[in-house]
Image: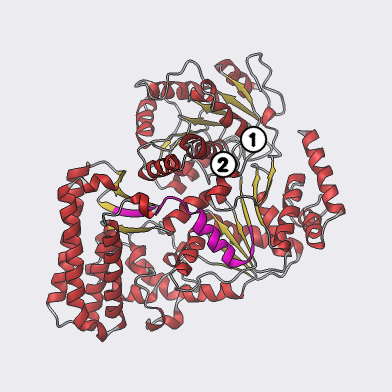
């Protein structure tokens, strides 16, 4: 590890000798005696961070595109923020989640700006669903009884906050972002009245966009970035300000988010909300046409009937499925036609009075828009010809119909080239082995410059990979029970302090039920409380065991002894029943590709890297990674996974786990003969 650091430091010295002023400024700021070391008490010098900052500074200066991976602990956030703030260019920084947005804007950027004495104007810009809409709040307050009981619960709290808030950012209130009140008091692209809104001059979203236009560095998230690209394609103008450079962090999430925005969808909630909004608007502006409320009721009844037919024909479980299942369900098809006819009836009832107000006029446009999307979904054109896949998603009492493009590389490449800006894509998990080909292909960036910096952590000393034996194949009936037994044995040695990460909710529930009466540590199970609350309780307890699925595989940072063991039940291959994956697999086969090698394996490798990355988050962390899936060592492709993980020692015996946890943190626990590199 020391040799690697020396080599990277030497490489950075060579970069410095021929560096441009922008590169040198970034290198100097991150030096052992640089501005950040002097201004931030907890700053640690890392040569990898310096090298990354120099490379990004060069890309920003030349307007180039760069794909780069930085291992955990590199300090990639500072590595891209420093050159961004020094670049004297308009830079848009896009992150994976709104939580990361807030962290960058409220903590990281102000720290760097103050340490470097850089008077940079920054702005935070979120999607419109994150800002209070005064007009929609007034509509809801005018007839609160017409809102769902769950939405009414917090309506008065939002009203009181609405009188005092300056920014209108819903994150200011301690109400979960999934709460039913938010769709009622925020706007969408469909229901926003724009310049015709009576509250246009006090619009919080408009003010946020104005601040973004004036700022030098703007922090957004991937959803807003992709929404902007999709809207621009439809001729609605750009949401984001024009920029000289885009830095995309957590870039591994971008292809799937882009696919959702370049596709289309219709949900039960959207349909019901259109009927409700139109009825509220009607009572406000034209309460003299009895046929209109009846038309709104017809839409709601048709949606309720469609919900019922979907559950009767396709099953009561929450799941995703291919559109062919709907095409084969006569009752569902008939119910969809009834929804379409109810929408047409609502449009006919609305058109005679639409001119009475901008809200009613827009209601006509909304009905036409959603009916056009519904007609597109139920069209009989084969998905292969449209290069998209149609599928459904059933969750709780709701449903959502989707049309998703199979690939976004070409469309994303076109949008990126339209910006004539520098683009930097970075994450801790972009490469498969040493190759960035999979990610580059998915976003249309083949042939661009790439770079990789390994983690500065000493994984050989700090971590141990345990592959238990014997293990049945994951397809065998007793596999989940065996995972539970392995987990219990490991947890007894680690004294709790563990994440159990699963590839399915079914396995999570089975293991949780088996462990609950047997484990002597607090058990926190996904779904029993909000995600943020579970993570906070995990940190506070210090010896808890948290069981989670997809959302816990990434974006969770628990440092110190509270998380000393990460147990993964299976290699995270996507479910073969997933309709989008099925369509992409078939498309690759038609093109003569190898779906497993070109799609399924790379995606699983990146997901495993994310899960494994939860373990070591700090130079003083120590822990054990348990991968129960025997395919990691029995199958030839297991080597691809192993080569993509940090270089930690490996064992298949519990004795080595005991020795590892018994060793002092500064010592070397990995001395047993059965451990291999």
Q: Which residue is mark 1?
A: 621
In the picture, residue 455 is in which quadrant?
A: top right
Q: Which residue is mark 2?
A: 558
- Residue at image coords 78%, 62%: 22
Q: Residue farthest to the bottom?
A: 356
Q: Say whether disc 1 or disc 2 marks the residue closer to the N-terminus.
A: 2
Look at the image and tell me whether residue 153 can be seen: yes
Residue closer to the observer: 291 or 41:
291
* In front of the other: 397 or 497: 397
Q: Secondary structure at mark 2?
A: loop
Whole-angstrom CA distance, mark 1 to mark 2, is 10 Å
Question: Which is nearer the eye, 406 or 30?
Answer: 406
Dot 2, how many residues are within 10 Å of its Cα: few (below 14), some (14-19), or many (20+)?
A: some
Above or below 113: residue 583: above
Q: Residue at x 37, y 66 (%)?
A: 157
- Against 231, residue 11 (above or below) is above
Q: Is residue 407 magenta?
A: yes
Residue at 56% in and 51% down = 251
User: Is 424 placed left or right of 524 in the picture?
Assistant: right
The magenta segment is 400-423
Q: What percent of the width, then of the height, locates residue 135?
A: 36, 77
Question: In the structure shown, which secondary structural element does the residue marked by tag 1 occupy?
Answer: loop
């Amino acid at each position: 590890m020391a040799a690697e650091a020396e080599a990277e430091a030497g490489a950075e010295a060579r970069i410095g000798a021929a560096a441009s002023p922008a590169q040198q400024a970034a290198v100097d700021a991150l030096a052992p005696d640089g501005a950040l070391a002097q201004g931030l008490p907890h700053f640690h010098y890392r040569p990898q961070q310096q090298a990354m900052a120099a490379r990004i500074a060069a890309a920003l200066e030349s307007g180039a595109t760069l794909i780069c991976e930085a291992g955990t602990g590199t300090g990639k956030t500072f590595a891209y923020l420093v050159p961004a703030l020094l670049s004297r260019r308009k830079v848009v920084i896009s992150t994976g989640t709104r939580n990361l947005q807030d962290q960058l804007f409220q903590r990281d950027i102000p720290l760097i700006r103050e340490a470097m004495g850089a008077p940079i104007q920054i702005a935070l810009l979120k999607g419109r669903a994150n800002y209070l809409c005064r007009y929609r709040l007034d509509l809801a307050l005018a007839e609160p009884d017409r809102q769902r009981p769950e939405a009414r619960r917090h309506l008065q709290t939002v009203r009181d906050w609405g009188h005092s808030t300056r920014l209108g950012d819903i994150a200011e209130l301690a109400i979960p972002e999934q709460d039913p009140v938010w769709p009622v008091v925020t706007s969408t692209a469909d229901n926003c009245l724009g310049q015709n809104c009576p509250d246009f001059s006090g619009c919080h979203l408009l003010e946020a966009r104005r601040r973004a236009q004036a700022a030098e560095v703007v922090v957004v998230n991937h959803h807003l970035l992709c929404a902007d690209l999709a809207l621009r394609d439809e001729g609605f103008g750009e949401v984001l300000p024009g920029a000289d450079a885009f830095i995309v962090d957590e870039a591994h999430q971008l292809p799937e988010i882009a696919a959702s925005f370049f596709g289309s969808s219709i949900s039960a909630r959207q349909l019901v909300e259109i009927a409700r909004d139109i009825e509220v608007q009607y009572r406000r502006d034209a309460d003299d046409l009895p046929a209109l409320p009846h038309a709104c009721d017809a839409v709601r009844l048709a949606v309720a009937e469609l919900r019922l037919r979907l559950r009767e024909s396709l099953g009561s479980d929450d799941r995703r499925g291919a559109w062919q299942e709907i095409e084969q369900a006569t009752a569902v098809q008939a119910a969809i036609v009834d929804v379409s006819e109810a929408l047409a009836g609502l449009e006919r009832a609305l058109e005679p009075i639409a001119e009475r107000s901008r809200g009613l006029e827009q209601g006509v446009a909304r009905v036409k828009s959603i009916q056009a999307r519904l007609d597109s979904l139920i069209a009989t054109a084969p998905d292969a010809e449209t290069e998209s896949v149609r599928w459904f998603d059933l969750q709780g009492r709701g449903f959502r119909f989707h049309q998703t493009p199979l690939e976004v590389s070409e469309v994303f490449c076109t949008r990126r080239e339209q910006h004539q800006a520098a683009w930097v894509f970075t994450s801790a998990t972009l490469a498969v082995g040493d190759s960035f080909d999979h990610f580059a292909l998915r976003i249309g960036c083949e042939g661009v410059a790439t770079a990789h910096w390994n983690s500065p952590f000493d994984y050989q000393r700090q971590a141990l990979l345990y592959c238990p034996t014997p293990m049945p194949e994951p397809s065998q009936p007793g596999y989940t029970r065996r995972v539970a037994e392995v987990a219990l044995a490991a947890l007894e040695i680690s004294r709790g302090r563990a994440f159990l990460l699963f590839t399915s909710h079914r396995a999570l529930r089975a293991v949780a039920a088996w462990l609950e009466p047997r484990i002597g540590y607090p058990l926190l199970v996904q779904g029993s409380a909000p995600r943020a609350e579970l993570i906070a309780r995990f940190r506070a307890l210090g010896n808890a065991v948290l069981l989670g699925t997809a959302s816990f595989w990434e974006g969770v940072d628990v440092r110190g002894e509270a998380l000393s063991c990460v147990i993964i039940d299976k290699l995270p291959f996507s479910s073969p029943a997933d309709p989008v994956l099925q369509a992409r697999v078939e498309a690759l086969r038609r093109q003569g590709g190898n779906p497993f090698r070109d799609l399924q394996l790379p995606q699983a490798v990146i997901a495993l890297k994310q899960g494994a990355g939860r373990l070591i988050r700090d130079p003083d962390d120590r822990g054990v990674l348990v991968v129960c899936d025997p395919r990691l060592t029995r199958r030839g492709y297991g080597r691809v996974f192993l080569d993509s993980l940090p270089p930690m020692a490996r064992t298949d015996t519990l004795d080595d786990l005991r020795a590892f946890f018994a060793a002092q943190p500064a010592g070397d626990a990995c001395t047993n003969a059965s451990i291999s590199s």
